[in-house]
Amino acid sequence: MAPRVVVVEADGGSRGNPGPAGYGAVVRAPDTGEVLAERSAAIGTATNNVAEYRGLIAGLEAAAELGAAEVEARMDSKLVVEQMCGRWQIKHPGLRPLAAQAAGLVGRFTAVRFTWIPRDRNRHADALANAAMDAAAGSPAQPAARTAEAPRQVAAADSPARAAAREAAARAATTRTSGTDPATAPASWEPRPSFTATRLVLVRHGATEYTEQRRYSGRGDVPLSDRGRSQVEAAANRVTALVPSAAAVVSSPLTRCRHTAETIAAALGGKPVRVDNDLVECDFGAWEGRTFTEVRERWAGEMDAWLASTAVAPPDGESFDDVAARSRRSVDELLKVYRGEAVVVVSHVSPIKLILRDALGGGDTMLHRLFLDAAGISVVDLWPDGGVAVRAVNDTAHLPSD
């Protein structure tokens, strides 16, 4: 049976930097430390960093061959760990193709966590790498010493440690992981490499008659107006310029979004449109189809309460907290399915605002201060460790002037 979780230890080096180079990688069972696979090779003349990346790639390939779903990648190379987490910029052009190859392998697993370890805890991979360097230099290679991690102690069935583990597991089952929660991402001022991110291009649908008449437009299936169709054509051209190789176009089920998404998909070469019900607009209940002025006059108290708290729903409607929960669910699914790729997401004002609020780490007042035009485009990059970069909000440069 294929192991679900494995540990990959990888290393690489050269004699001279650049010089005769090689790498080593070990795949272990996380609970026993048993060696499941080894990889090593001489790679001719190369730098330390190139060899380290080659070791990581070999280790991830070995883990994939074993059928693992999750990987903890351990290396004593601070540079490779930080670059793969997106916290350090990849400045050397020779490393970028290797980092891209590693990122592609990361996308084959459900989850990958990168961890820096001291060199003395990476002795097995280091020994394999040194043997490979000897081979590259023409020296007789010495067999690498096989080392096994000491098995982890297992707590007794009713011990405090086992109880604490159960409690931690229960918390993990009901909270978001660091791979999807921007709040847990490490802070960094340095630009991250965009090719390791999942890019969400968030597009609000084109205008409808309700948009132009300033009416609440939630679950009512209102079609695009003539102006909206013109906006959508312009948005499709803009999206094609931004992400010409987008992996998918995902849409709310309502007609105004479907029409927008289908126009964009056609401009991208005829990609199919995937419908996600979690991207549908907020249910405004009794306010649906009414003008903003009408609602203010008839439901003044209810509107004040709604504006004051995201937990409050319009009469017979849906709260923003509920919309936020399904919007996050949609984003989490996109990160799993399209990891490291660009995805066009066509939705409505409320889901897009809530996605941007979470990405920016903003408060609820942001929802009432952020304006999103019909057919406006926002761009968010999301990294596996929870890192976020909001690259554009409500870009309307492509739209014809009123």
Image (tube, rainbow, N blue to C red):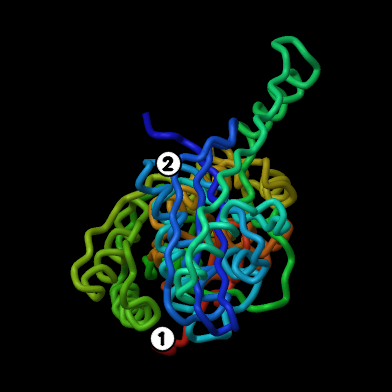
- Contact (Cβ within 8 Å) of mark 1 with mark 2: no
Residue 356 lies, in percent from the top left, at 59, 63
Q: Nearer the viewer, mark 1 or mark 2?
A: 2
Residue in the foreground of this view, choosing between 50 and 106: 50
Q: Residue at x 72, y 19 (%)?
A: 155
Query: Viewer-proximal residue, 342 or 152?
Result: 152
Relative image position of residue 352 (x, y in whole percent): 52, 60
State the residue position of label 1.
398
Indicate whether 353 appears above or below 134.
above
Q: Quadrant of residue 69?
A: top left
**Left or right position of 152 against 102:** right
* Label 2 neighbour load within 10 Å: few <14, some 14-19, many 20+: many
Residue 91's spot in the image, x, y percent? 58, 85
- The answer to whether one can see residue 55 in this image is no
Residue reaching furthest to the right:
160
Decide which of tag 1 and tag 2 comes sooner along the chain. Answer: 2
Q: Residue at x 29, y 56 (%)?
A: 255
Quarter holding the C terminus? bottom left
Name the residue: 60% across, 47% down: 320
88 or 379, nearer to the observer? 88
Q: Residue furthest bottom?
A: 401
- Estimate the x, y position of residue 274 in percent, counting from the top left: 29, 53
Q: What residue is shown at x 46% (from left), y 46% (from top)?
A: 110
Label 2 amino acid? Answer: Ala
Is 254 above or below relative to 94? above
Q: What amino acid type is highlighted by mark number 1?
A: His
Image check: 162 left or right of 221? right
19 shown above or below 38? below
Quadrant placement of the N terminus? top left
**Residue furthest front as drawn:** 140
Disc 1/disc 2 C-alpha distance (Å): 45 Å
- Disc number placed over residue 68 in the picture, else none: 2
